[in-house]
């Protein structure tokens, strides 16, 4: 089919939907973006759920991400309840689950992606303006009641923080499902250490569906149209029509204007929001959902935290019911009790992988018993008392050092942010610290959890490059140190430095006999296993840290036998403990 817009007869569509394919939305610079619109067959004015992103609106979830789809529907059959899944797309709302409830679903291909032409440059000011204008367009259509809600996972959540800070007049509510809010600290550099995820993601999930990429022969099964548009661009033209994303990130190794353009002023957000995070999301979105909730200027805002895979609960009955109650209240004006909900909605994680619902009045939880456990380099333990002075050294690329508490005498829960204060020295002018909270059974076996991406993730993780240890005291709290990452301060070899490491939020209830531990090492956490786990949309095997690795040779030390030119040597790091160097971890213990 070649026409720009086609309306499918609602009589032959599930739930009597009217579908307008490839609707043009003109931008102020002449670029025309393309949107698919799913709306009730009955003429009327309805609230709009809008998403704007790069993954090609004509690519079915099942085709583009088969391993993720197959696992989700096998483990959670309620995902498909009431839907043919014919219109499922990656990380956006299924219209068959929303249109029958009186909503219009609008999916827009971002500039330079799918069927929308233009220069591809993620999350920059131009893209945010495009998104803003799409919101205003949707609010002024004859099928719209003038209220637009934003909904989606990951990319479709991250850019909600940005556009909401521009305050479109028709924007009425945000459902930010697992979406980072700080480009530098959550997407590209963890504690100042370069994460390779963004570059790999761009190569595997975005470039193949760049507008004009005729090497991708996939088509929208409903229209027969190419998912990458009708233009056919050469390889050279495609390269010229997009940023070199990986190179851009490598060039900007400190937080500068490149990142501030892409990180919104959260205080400017005023509309109601539901920020839904995942306990297993260390490495990308988890921190952003919490920080976005705390920083947003909205008077009506809620934080929800859950488990399972990154995309799962957005589609399950649990997630859909939560979203629908939220949107029904703010987009339809229904008095359904949503505004009476406490602002914090938690699914508390247990060691056996189950979850228990709980609500709270604020974050961190008001009843938190902030508990300090000191590292004892002599005994290899965590202790509530300051130990005698000691030190222990480890190689940056070696196994690191682990400190464990005594076996728990009672049920114990930690829920909230954590932090480590470490006193270290290095034999060179740099050191990278990876801090991992872990749990062990009474028999000494490690307890891992289903992460947002990795099936065997640890309790929590934190990172810090020692040369970027400077704190911003105005933004820091004991449980959440904040580093400006605007300059490097090389170490003087063998001098001792105090480092405050942010450990991303977590939740875990452990039974008696189990042990909590903290591992300090100089590389990514990796679970010892011969098991091979991989998803179709990631380059690496999943061994504990998912795709959120810090292994770029231009940024990280390499083994001595490496022949990579320019890489720095690995450090010999010494961890100091005791009264003069009170290295410790601060844990959010919740009274049972």
Image: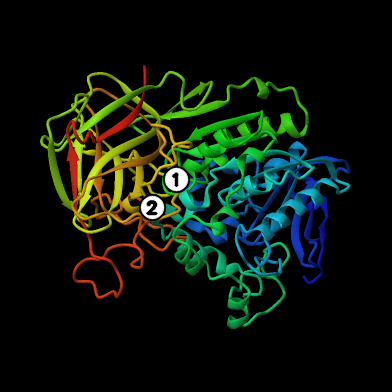
Can you see residue 319? yes
Residue 353 location, quadrant:
top left
Can you see residue 17? no
Residue at x-position 49% and y-position 53%? 184
Q: Is residue 123 left or right of residue 331?
A: left
Q: Which mark is residue 330?
A: none
Q: Are marks 1 and 2 in contact (CB under 8 Å)?
A: yes
Residue 3 picture location, percent across and down: 82, 69
Q: Is residue 576 left or right of residue 507?
A: left
Residue under label 1 = 452
State the SS at label 2: loop
Front-most of residues 27 and 537 = 27
Residue 423 location, quadrant:
top left
State the SS at label 1: loop
325 in relation to 142, above or below: above
Residue 429 picture location, percent across and down: 26, 58
Q: How many marks are shown on the rendered structure?
A: 2
Q: Which badge, 1 or 2, comes first in the chain's sequence?
A: 1
426 in relation to 358, above or below: below
Find the distance from the CA under tag 1 to the CA under tag 2. Answer: 8 Å
Residue at x-position 67% and y-position 40%? 268
Residue at x-position 46% and y-position 27%? 364
Front-most of residues 213 and 381 = 381
Residue under label 2 = 546
Residue 27 picture location, percent across and down: 79, 61
Residue 356 picture location, percent across and down: 44, 25
Residue 128 location, quadrant:
bottom right
Residue at x-position 26% and y-position 53%? 522
Q: Residues within 10 Å of mark 2 (few under 14, many from 20)?
A: many
Quadrant location of the N terminus? Answer: bottom right
Q: Residues within 10 Å of mark 1 (few under 14, many from 20)?
A: many
Quadrant location of the C terminus? Answer: top left
């Amino acid at each position: 089919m070649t026409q720009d817009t086609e309306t499918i007869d609602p009589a032959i569509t599930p739930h009597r939907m009217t579908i307008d394919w490839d609707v043009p939305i003109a931008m102020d610079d002449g670029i025309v973006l393309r949107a698919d619109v799913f709306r009730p067959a009955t003429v009327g004015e309805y609230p709009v759920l809008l998403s704007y992103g790069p993954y090609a609106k004509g690519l079915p979830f099942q085709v583009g991400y088969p391993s993720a789809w197959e696992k989700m529907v096998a483990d959670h059959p309620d995902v498909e309840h009431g839907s043919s899944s014919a219109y499922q797309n990656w990380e956006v709302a299924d219209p068959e689950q929303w249109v029958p409830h009186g909503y219009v679903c609008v999916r827009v291909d971002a500039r330079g992606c799918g069927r929308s032409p233009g220069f591809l440059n993620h999350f920059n000011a131009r893209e945010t303006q495009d998104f803003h204008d799409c919101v205003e367009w949707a609010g002024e259509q004859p099928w719209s009641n003038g209220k637009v809600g934003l909904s989606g996972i990951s990319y479709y959540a991250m850019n909600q923080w940005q556009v909401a800070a521009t305050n479109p007049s028709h924007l009425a509510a945000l459902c930010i499902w697992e979406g980072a809010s700080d480009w530098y600290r959550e997407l590209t550099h963890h504690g100042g250490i370069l994460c390779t995820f963004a570059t790999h993601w761009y190569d595997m999930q975005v470039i193949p569906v760049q507008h004009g990429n005729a090497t991708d022969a996939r088509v929208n099964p409903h229209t027969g149209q190419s998912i990458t548009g009708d233009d056919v661009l050469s390889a050279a033209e495609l390269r010229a029509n997009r940023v070199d994303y990986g190179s851009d990130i490598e060039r900007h190794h400190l937080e500068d204007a490149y990142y501030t353009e892409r990180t919104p002023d959260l205080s400017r957000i005023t509309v109601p929001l539901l920020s839904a995070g995942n306990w297993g999301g260390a490495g990308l979105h988890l921190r952003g959902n919490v920080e976005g909730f705390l920083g947003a200027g909205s008077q009506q805002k809620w934080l929800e935290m859950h488990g399972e895979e990154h995309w799962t609960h957005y589609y399950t009955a649990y997630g859909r019911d939560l979203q629908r109650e939220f949107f029904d209240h703010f987009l339809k004006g229904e008095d359904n009790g949503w505004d009476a909900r406490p602002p914090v909605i938690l699914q508390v994680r247990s060691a056996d992988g189950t979850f228990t619902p709980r609500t709270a009045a604020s974050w961190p939880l008001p009843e938190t018993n902030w508990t300090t456990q000191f590292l004892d380099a002599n005994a290899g333990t965590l202790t509530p008392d300051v130990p005698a002075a000691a030190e222990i050294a480890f190689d940056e690329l070696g196994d690191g050092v682990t400190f464990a508490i005594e076996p728990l005498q009672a049920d114990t829960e930690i829920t909230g942010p954590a932090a480590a204060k470490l006193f270290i020295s290095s034999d060179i002018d740099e050191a990278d610290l990876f801090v991992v909270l872990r749990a062990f059974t009474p028999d000494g076996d490690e307890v891992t959890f289903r992460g947002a991406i990795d099936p065997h993730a640890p309790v929590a993780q934190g990172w810090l490059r020692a040369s970027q240890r400077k704190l911003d005291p105005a933004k820091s709290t004991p449980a959440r140190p904040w580093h400006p990452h605007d300059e490097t301060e090389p170490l003087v070899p063998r001098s001792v430095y105090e480092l405050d490491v942010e450990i991303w939020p977590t939740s875990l209830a452990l039974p008696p006999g189990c042990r909590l531990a903290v591992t300090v090492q100089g590389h990514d956490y990796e679970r010892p296993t011969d098991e091979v786990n991989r998803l179709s949309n990631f380059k690496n095997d999943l061994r504990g840290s998912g795709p959120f690795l810090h292994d770029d040779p231009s940024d990280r030390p390499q083994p001595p036998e490496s022949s990579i030119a320019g890489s720095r040597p690995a450090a010999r790091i010494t961890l100091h403990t005791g009264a003069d160097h009170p290295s410790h971890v601060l844990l959010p213990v919740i009274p049972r």
